[in-house]
């Protein structure tokens, strides 16, 4: 199966621009790349084309809407705000995070306390055999936030074992059934903001209970992009930790064959991740318990003007095997600068990221 840009080839026949045409002026080309011998071109208006041998451009999909991106943010007083499209409410974005899941109730009450503008988390996803579709898991989250209990997937602060403090985020989900691509039990904030040229430092501690390991542990994504394209920390099917860009031809970053370290279960593991965001000058570094696994150049953005505005934690994908997964996540930090030694006991959650207004 051919892998193309941004994961999915979606035939949007009803969209303006569908069909084939001659080449578009180079000034309108945002990016171009080749995947499995096929050339793709992304234009500045967010449309993706496949270039045929006769130089015809065949419309594939709308990757992003420039007008939607513009409406979603406003810069005021040096602070970039995300604008809710329904209410018009503004929420300050950030590049920093220090979350230990302390000062929370446990269980579903804890998830309800986390998903709050004051705390900074904006949604959770519990995609499972009971709720396999978008409509089903969105409806489940709504019921949980209104007071109901979980189904067969859970995302909740729990006591009884933490990397620091007394609580950790517990994510539990069954394996996907036939016909499902993945299962998920994750917590997300849509209030981060990173663009080309930024450095991203991420750190978290993980505890896999049992021998079933999730595929994806953390995703930095663009939720205004087709298929929420982005980059993620993964445990490959062979059992080693690495990084995958969910875009272009899905490049991966992992240790060379023969030098790969299994991701352990039944113990706390600290994962640290450094990204330099870019297409031509991107770079990835990844550590597991202070052992450097990856230090490699490569694309870390889907295209040059992409915005990463979503950080997803927990079991963001359980894709392999038939057994359920339980993952604890704790001591989560995000920064545009390298971390000092050791996490703080508890930092300020989601402080404002102050930007210099354009002159």
Image (tube, grey):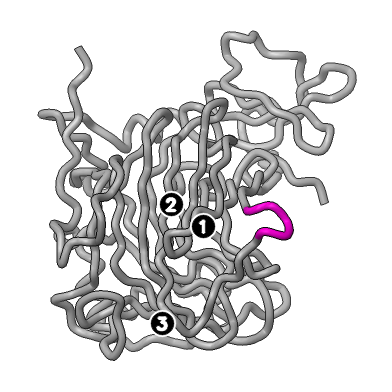
Q: Dot 3: within a 10 Å radius of its alpha carbon, few (fewer than 14), some, or many (20 or more) residues?
A: many
The Cα–Cα distance between marks 2 and 3, rounded to whole angstroms, is 26 Å
Q: Dot 2: within a 10 Å radius of its alpha carbon, few (fewer than 14), some, or many (20 or more) residues?
A: many
Q: Are marks 2 and 3 in contact (CB under 8 Å)?
A: no
Image point 81% across, 20% down: which residue? 56
Q: Position of residue 223 (x, y in %)?
A: 44, 48
Tell me the residue that label 2 is attached to.
Answer: 273
| Element assignment for label 3 | strand
The Cα–Cα distance between marks 1 and 3, rounded to whole angstroms, is 21 Å
Residue 347 placement, left or right of 290: left
Residue 188 placement, left or right of 184: left
Q: Quadrant of residue 71?
A: top left
Q: Position of residue 134 (x, y in %)?
A: 52, 66
Between 160 and 150, the one nearer to me in the picture: 160
The stretch in magenta equals: 255-259
Tell me the residue that label 3 is attached to.
Answer: 154
Image point 18% across, 83% down: which residue? 105
The Cα–Cα distance between marks 1 and 2, rounded to whole angstroms, is 8 Å
Q: Is residue 140 visible?
A: no
Residue 231 placement, left or right of 123: right
- Which label lies toward us, 1 or 2? 2
Residue 257 in magenta?
yes
Specify the principal SS of the magenta part.
loop
| Element assignment for label 1 | strand
Between 42 and 332, the one nearer to me in the picture: 332
Image point 25% across, 60% down: which residue? 342
User: What quarter of the picture does the C terminus occupy?
Assistant: top left
- Which label lies toward us, 2 or 3? 2
Q: Are marks 1 and 2 in contact (CB under 8 Å)?
A: yes
Tell me the residue that label 1 is attached to.
Answer: 233
| Element assignment for label 2 | strand
């Amino acid at each position: 199966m051919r892998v193309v840009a941004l994961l999915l080839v979606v035939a949007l026949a009803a969209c303006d621009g569908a069909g084939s045409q001659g080449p578009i002026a180079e000034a309108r080309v945002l990016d171009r790349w080749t995947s499995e011998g096929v050339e793709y071109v992304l234009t500045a208006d967010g449309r993706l084309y496949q270039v045929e041998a006769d130089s015809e451009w065949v419309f594939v999909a709308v990757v992003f809407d420039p007008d939607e991106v513009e409406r979603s943010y406003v810069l005021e007083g040096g602070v970039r705000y995300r604008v809710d499209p329904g209410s018009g409410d503004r929420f300050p974005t950030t590049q920093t995070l220090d979350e230990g899941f302390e000062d929370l109730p446990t269980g579903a009450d804890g998830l309800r306390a986390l998903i709050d503008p004051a705390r900074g988390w904006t949604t959770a996803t519990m995609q499972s055999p009971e709720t396999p579709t978008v409509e089903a898991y969105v409806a489940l989250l709504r019921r949980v936030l209104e007071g109901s209990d979980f189904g067969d997937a859970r995302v909740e602060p729990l006591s009884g074992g933490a990397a620091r403090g007394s609580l950790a985020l517990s994510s539990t989900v069954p394996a996907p059934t036939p016909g499902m691509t993945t299962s998920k039990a994750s917590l997300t904030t849509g209030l981060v903001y990173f663009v080309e040229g930024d450095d991203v430092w991420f750190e978290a501690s993980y505890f896999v209970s049992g021998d079933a390991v999730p595929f994806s542990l953390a995703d930095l994504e663009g939720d205004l992009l087709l298929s929420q394209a982005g980059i993620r920390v993964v445990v490959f099917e062979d059992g080693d930790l690495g990084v995958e860009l969910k875009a272009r031809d899905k490049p991966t970053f992992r240790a060379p064959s023969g030098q790969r370290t299994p991701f352990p279960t039944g113990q706390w593991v600290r994962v640290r991740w450094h990204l330099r965001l870019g297409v031509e000058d991107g770079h990835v570094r990844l550590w597991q318990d202070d052992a450097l696994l990856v230090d490699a150049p490569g694309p870390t953005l889907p295209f040059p003007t992409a915005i990463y505005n979503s950080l997803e934690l927990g079991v963001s994908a359980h894709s392999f095997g038939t057994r359920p997964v339980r993952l604890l996540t704790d001591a989560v930090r995000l920064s545009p600068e390298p971390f000092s030694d050791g996490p703080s006991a508890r930092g300020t959650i989601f402080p404002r990221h102050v930007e210099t207004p354009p002159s």
